[in-house]
Amino acid sequence: MAVVFDGDDTLWSTEPLYDAARDRARDEVEHAGLDGHEWERLERRIDVDNVSRFGFSTERFPTSCVEAYDALCAAKSVTPTTDVRQRIADAARTVFSTDPLLLPHAREILEQLREQGIRLALLTKGDAVLQRRRIDHSGLARMFDIIRVVDEKSPETFQEVVNSLSAQPERSWSIGNSIKSDVLPAIEAHLRAVWIDAHVWEHETLSNLPKNQSVLVANSIAQVPELITAIDADLPSEV
């Protein structure tokens, strides 16, 4: 059996980092005399739109924060200033200077699966340099047989990872919090999936989980070993 884990908000939590950086940037907007709530509404929309321009590079979020400030200034007939724009960008970039904390049970679950002889992969999206740093600082790298950082997850990506682990797709699992990235392409590649019902940012949001017997739902990563081993026990032995 092979298990392919997502990284952000599956093994470690990035949501508090973005919340803190966004709060700092919003403070700068409010100090400039503008509505911080309206700025955040604009920023969240612009940040999703900017994926098409910047992908998951570290320039996207700071740029989105500054562009939201510019848009709010235009709407209020206020002239944006270079100084405020720079302070907003600097505040936004603090999201990348702090390493995220591991989610509860992440290390223990990976160790438990490895002890059972299950092959593990980490397949995560994002800026390659940033994600590699997060992986290294997490202390989890040694637990994975394969680590891949990609711009997008596709059925072909999952197939390549599973093939590299010499595993059968039908006996492999994708574990993650995004229906769009961790569930749909995995089941298209004939893996099964555990969707962790946790924070996911707006770009990854889908309203409905597919009705598929190959998809299970967990409230936390702690439930993963019991779920996948129970299902695997009912399958014919690998040949």
Image: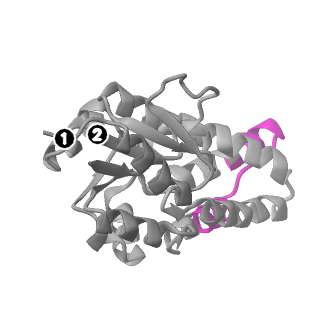
**Residue type for callout 2:** Arg
Residue annotated with mark 1:
238
Q: Is residue 68 above or below residue 99?
A: above
| Image label count | 2
Counting other residues with Cα less than 10 Å from the Cα at mark 2, is it few (<14), some (14-19), or many (20 or more)?
many
Q: Residue at x 34, y 25 (%)?
A: 188
Residue 158 appears at what percent x and percent y?
28, 39
Amino acid type, callout 1: Glu
Q: Nearer the viewer, residue 200 or 61?
A: 200
Q: Quadrant of residue 152?
A: top left
On the rendered structure, is 100 left or right of 136? right
Q: Is residue 191 left or right of residue 88?
A: left
Please tell me which residue is depicted at 19% across the width and 44% down the height of the picture: 167
Mark closer to the chain start, 2 or 1:
2
What is the magenta segment's predominant secondary structure?
Answer: helix
Residue 188 appearing in the image: yes
The residue positioned farthest toward the top in the image shown: 211
In depth, the one of 209 and 100 nearer the eye is 209
Where is mark 2, residue-wise? 171
Magenta residues (range): 69-92
Is 127 magenta? The answer is: no
Say if mark 2 contacts mark 1, CB within 8 Å.
yes
Disc 1: CA contacts within 10 A as few (<14), some (14-19) or many (>=20):
few
SS at badge 1: loop
